[in-house]
Image (cartoon, rainbow, N blue to C red):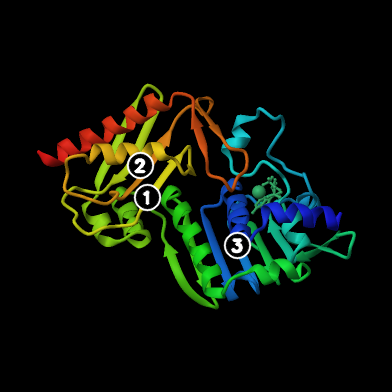
Amino acid sequence: PQLANQIAAGEVVERPASVVKELVENSLDAGATRVDIEIDKGGSKLIRIRDNGVGIPKDELSLALSRHATSKLHSLDDLEAILSFGFRGEALASISSVSRLTLTSNTAGQSEAWQAYAEGSQMAVRVIPAAHPIGSTIEVIDLFFNTPARRRFLKSDKTEFTHIDEWLKRIALVRGEIHFTLSHNGKLVRNYRPALTQAQYLQRLAQVSDRHFAEQALRIECEHDGLRLSGYLQSPLQTRATETHYFYVNGRLVRDRLVNHAVRQAFAGQAQAEQPAYVLMLNLDPHQVDVNVHPAKHEVRFHQGRYIHDYILQALQSALEQAGE
Ligand code: ADP
Ligand code: MG
């Protein structure tokens, strides 16, 4: 199974940031409200994710480390599963095959915590007693130690850490209620405190993006016919450029030209030359959109693209009009 897992790892685990992504998404799926991320040497030495989610019961620990053992997908058209992040059931097994991974977890129903790790070419899972509050800690040491080609492909620690930091920014903006921390080589680099109010969210926006954008941004909030658009748009008064362009569909960051086009069109006639900054979240019936099942691609296809485009455009235009009054 190790070889099969390593081959699968080639698809799931490209670099430390992809490990962080898979692990943090698992924490969020587990209902965590706080996720602490510790990185050493850009993630090649250590990636440790600690959460306060529901945890994994002792008798499911070894299953969690085996391939295609997902607790999240019961049938292929299980849309709930597609909305939750993970639905392939191979991230932990894959990561474990290309690193030294330990999984420590405790649940409300248990009197003690347990730790699991896979060893040997057969990846036999060992489970031993441990100490841990309710929730999980996944520790990934020496990523790619046994796949030297991949290890050589890694960039400098600084670059790999930047990829992690950028990924966390995207998730921090859409999961304001979650407390995230990120440390590198023992130093706290980010502390995104829970943003439960609008004012707190703007603080987070200032941390992730910049203060000018957060101070002046126009709030977008509109709901109509099963579509909901919310977020922030650069004010026409802001002269300083901000490179913040985030568009989420049902909680996932996507790359889509439609929203850039709508933003530019809304600003037509305004002084800005560059693409105005925005953080926009669109929520709609998942049947109205195809999410590319390859999780790294961030692509979506709307069934009624024109309609969605015009809806976004109108929401932005009316916010701009109100701001101009
Ligand atoms: P998937 O997320 O696609 O189901 P993974 O390999 O990422 O597959 O995880 C396997 C299983 O391990 C999950 O389905 C979940 O039951 C469990 N799991 C992994 N990480 C956590 C976590 N942080 N908290 C609780 N359960 C987890
Ligand atoms: Mg997962």
Where is the N terminus found, in terms of image quarters? bottom right
Q: Are dots 2 and 1 in contact, CB under 8 Å?
A: yes
Q: Give whichever of discs 2 and 1 has the lower sequence position.
A: 1
Q: Are dots 3 and 1 in contact, CB under 8 Å?
A: no
Where is the C terminus found, in terms of image quarters? top left
Q: Give whichever of discs 2 and 3 has the lower sequence position.
A: 3
- Amino acid, disc 1: His
Residue on which the image places disc 2: 260
Q: Quadrant of residue 140?
A: bottom right
Question: 277 or 99, which lies in front?
Answer: 277
**Circle count:** 3
Residue on which the image places disc 1: 245
Q: CA distance from mark 3 to mark 1?
A: 29 Å
- Amino acid, disc 2: Asn
**Helix, strand, or loop for circle 1?**
strand
Q: CA distance from mark 2 to mark 3?
A: 36 Å
Q: CA distance from mark 2 to mark 1?
A: 8 Å
Please state which of the two labelled residues, at mark 2 or mark 1, is closer to the viewer: 2
- Amino acid, disc 3: Arg
Residue on which the image places disc 3: 50
Q: Residue at x 38, y 60 (%)?
A: 208
Q: Is residue 282 left or right of residue 125?
A: left
Q: Position of residue 115 (x, y in %)?
A: 76, 63
**Helix, strand, or loop for circle 3?**
strand
